[in-house]
Image: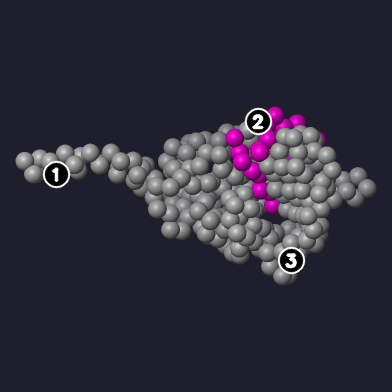
Amino acid sequence: MKLFSALLSALSVMPAAAFAMGPWKDACTGQTPCEIGGRSYHVLPPDGWDGETPMPVLLHFHGWQRQGTLIVRHQRISGATRRRGVLLVAPNGLGRSWDFWRPGTPDVDFARAVLKEVRKTWPVTDDRIYVSGYSWGSNMAWRFVCEDGADIAALLAVSGTLSQTEDCPTAPAEVRQVYGLNDQVLDFPFGPGGDTEYPVSLWREKYGCADGTDQGPWAARDFLTFRRTTWDCPGGHVSLDIHPGGHFIPHGWIARQLDEMLGLPPSYP
């Protein structure tokens, strides 16, 4: 009788335990690519994750001639997600590049499929899906949220945009852009008369923004200072960080954005 009771007790907890483990227990992670439809992507869970708690997601598009293998070990990207409880997802572009030049690109469909599979495999926080990218990957991130951004919490774009005259049918809840005034790879997109707010004019118009607010300087590291302008608009929030440097992912920039959006104390790294 005691054995029968113990067996019943064990059976009663098995479904919960199995659910807690979930399909992610056999999932590909880190340098091992996840295959999907003849293409691939990489996933990196955060440090110390308990295997159950739903996680925010950062979908990051790599730069030209890069791959997700770099992203999941990049200190300024994965170093930020790992310490903040964020699941990092890094799709691989065909030919180590992205097709973002026109609407209807297959890369948007690919990224959408990746997110769908990630949601099925991992416990994620659906209202905290962030999309990021660097350089051409930033252009691709713009393209993705332009066409499939209705359920995206934020765009975190580094040194890359689309044309500000692009017609975007969707938009994320907020946009955070960083750009170097001395970028000589993807030149800083100055507007008429040298307007330095032009890199986010597309989103300001779409959100119905009025004048921005100069938030003054800030720095994650003492060797690089940003000047931030923000717009709180009827349709969403826009933030633009400008620095005097060139074409790179600034130290601590992605980390600071995640801290602010997740309500965490700002920290480095």
| Residue denoted by label 2 | 104
| Disc sitting over residue 224 in the figure | 3
Q: CA distance from mark 2 to mark 1?
A: 58 Å
Q: Position of residue 90 (x, y in %)?
A: 54, 48
Residue type of the residue flagged with mark 3: Leu
Can residue 244 be seen in this snapshot?
A: yes
Query: Circle 1 is placed at which residue position?
Result: 6
Report which quarter residue 264 is drawn in: bottom right
Circle 1 residues within 10 Å: few <14, some 14–19, many ≥20: few
The magenta segment is 151-173
Q: Residue at x 76, y 38 (%)?
A: 233
Q: CA distance from mark 3 to mark 1?
A: 62 Å
Q: What percent of the width, then of the height, locates residue 118?
A: 47, 41
Task: Return the disc, 3 or 1, that comes first in the chain's sequence.
Answer: 1
Inspect the image, locate mark 1, and give the three-letter code of the amino acid beneath it: Ala
Query: Which residue appears at 58% of the width and 50% of the height?
Result: 262
- SS state under label 2: loop
